[in-house]
Amino acid sequence: MTSTPGTAPGTPPGGPSRLRRRAGTAAVAALLLAGVPAGAAVSADAGTPRTATGPQGQKLTVSATTGLDPAGQKIRVQGEGYGLTTGIYVALCKDNGDNRVPSPCLGGADMSGGSKTSQWIVPPGDPYEGDLASAFGPGGTFDVEIEITEKGDGLDCAEVACSVVTRADHRAAGNRTQDVRIPVAFAGQEPGEPGGGEGVDVPAGTVSYKSAAEFTTAGKPLDLLLHPDSKKLYVGADNLPDTADVDERGLHVLNPEDGASESWISQAPGSTGALRASAAARIAGPLPGDGVVYNYPLRGVGSAKSGDEAASGVWLAGSTITDIAPGTTPDTVLVAQGATLSEIERATGTATRTLTLPGGTQFAADPERGAVWYTDFTAGKLHRVDLASFTVTGSSDLPGGPGGMAGFTETDPATGAVWVGVDRSVLVFDAAGTLVKTLVGKDLARDAAFDTATGRAHVVWQDGGDLSDPANDNNGTLTVYGTEDFAPAAKDLSLPGNHSQAGAASLAVEPGGATVFVTSPAEGKITRLVRQVSPLVTHAPEDLTAKEGEEVALTAEAEGTPEPTVRWQVSADGAQTWQDVEGATEPALTFTARTAQDGYRYRAEFRNDVGTTRTAAVTLTVTPATGGDSGGDTGGTGDASNGAGSTGGDGSTGGDGGTQSSGGSTTDGSGSTGTTTGDSGSTGTTGGSTAAAGGSTGTAGSSGSTVGGGVAGGTGTAATSGGGSLAATGATVMSVTLAAAALVGTGVLVHRRARRRTEGAL
């Protein structure tokens, strides 16, 4: 969309003063002399010293901002333009965004004067000046050195966005006018990591889940499997008393989108081979194409697919089956009958090999690494069984000792790690059987499912359901963890009413983690959860410089689920207050730059159901135009003495149909007049200068520019050579201005020059 500059929030009604124009001209000259960007909100090249502008015009410069040594590195921090009434701290801090205190900081709030990781700067004459703090120099300047590390004092820049900042000292802790921030990154990071914008209510890119549907079409759900080929949701179920006139036991096949029943296999062969109504207690795994292998009480091993009228199966000898998993061949399954582990043929029920362990009831198979992990909760042991030799090759202790409440045993297919749920904890062992992490929850750990596409583990915790226990509230929890760092990868989700009094909850995760299914046996339902992500900025605007009348554009993009909307905001007071730009709801904000907008700050705000994320504020620098597009102030007086021309005052370019003149004076010579002619009847007249021997007339015909006087956006210089001829014209001024714009204009994604109405402007 296009925003009309005249209606931009905060635009002053009057035009810029001469002082402002002169300041803009001086800034261009300073940029050209320095050869690097300066004075913009953040300089373009992150590999060089970076400069940021504060809400009161303060300038902060940091000597190095990327590739910093995590173990420690000294950096130089300089400032100018700080107020002389408020002390500040200079430190590395967690960057919490605009108008939020940067905290925590490395070195804390140093009031001792002994820290090397932060510095305290105070106004001259402050009681703390001396050993505790250093004083500002003239013009609110300082030049200090601090030593920063990636981690320390409660700050971890590997986990949060960090910046070198100035902030008001402890005597004015709520004062945000001294906050100036420059993002930094240590080796292995990109600037601003972890970034993606400033999350307002939740961090940018926050993952969470919400309930999208509840299915009550499968009786009392006991186990789940989302078939990898057919994408159908298989549910092992028992009957839920008093909810229907029919016995709901069996294997249910549901449409995963709406829970509609596609098939129900209620019959399976019993001990005599005759079909009978049977619950489906545990699902071992999928069959190729469609269908599953499962266990039905007490010792049945069956298989069925959608559309079957009954399951086929065998009845095993021995004790009750307590766990089941795919075997080492497509025709076999691994079965636990208490402490006995067997591999049996599905067609006949014949055991091809058997192993009796010291104890245990459940296991997890890791065919990729040829292992089975057998859990003995009673004895507090985890045994490793080698699948090739079918022998125990190692044992590990379960922390907490014998007698822990049995939860689950699952292996991560990607890493081989073993996750064991015991009581209110999940114990994570690596592929060698070494305990590497203990995850503690507020409820009972009941099941885990892994998504190898995202490297995340989903864990369902069930409330105990006994409300006489103060720890119980009848509500379960879904948590998500990274499988490498075990850090939370999503906001915890409460599961109201999901308790363990009627059976253990189970999980199924769609590849990619976009959808999760959770059972609640006590409620007789399956909840379909969908992942949502708060907006994460993928493309942020950058500072830009433009000339008066040029069309510029800022663009920003963000991803999130649901897809976020965007609106642009503007601040005319150094990011202290913000207003929406009317109608600016597209990724690109385009408008015509006006000098009244010089110093304005802009940001994009993205929103969805999960949260709000803002881009960092960027600064617009507008320099006065050098062409004949608009009328300006009256030109100053050019002066030439002793045969040398000097620059006059702040005369501006004449506009269409207007005239501008500046008088000249001569010393020891006769003056000659230089005349410039603009387009559309615009005439600019400048005083000439002559040498004592008599000067020659200098004539310039570029864009109505005034030579010998100050020009909007640059300075015209009249130099005399060999009798007083003018050696510079308005065309030279234009090229200087363009060079300066090129230095600071790296933030412009679309920065096209408005058509000049004056011939010869370029």
Image (tube, rainbow, N blue to C red):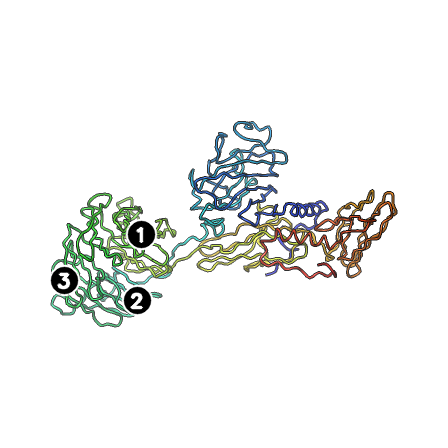
> Is residue 196 rendered to the left or right of residue 308?
right
Residue 249 shows up from this direction: no
Q: Which mark is residue 351?
A: 3
> Where is mark 2, residue-wise?
254
Residue at screen point 84% across, 53% down: 697
In what quadrant of the picture does the N terminus appear?
bottom right
Q: Position of residue 564 (x, y in %)?
A: 48, 58
Amino acid type shown at disc 1: Gly
Q: Secondary structure at mark 1?
A: strand
The tag earlier along the polypeptide, 1 or 3, is: 3
Front-lying residue, 106 or 736: 736
Is residue 462 among what the camera can see?
Answer: yes
Q: Decide which of 162, 587 is in the foreground and name it.
A: 162
Which residue position is annotated with label 1?
476
Q: Which callout, 3 or 2, points at the residue further toward the start of the chain?
A: 2
- Relative side of 106 to 373, left or right: right
User: Whole-Å distance between the Cαs marked 3 and 2?
Assistant: 33 Å
**Residue 145: image x %, image y %?**
53, 36
Closest to the observer, 627 or 689: 689
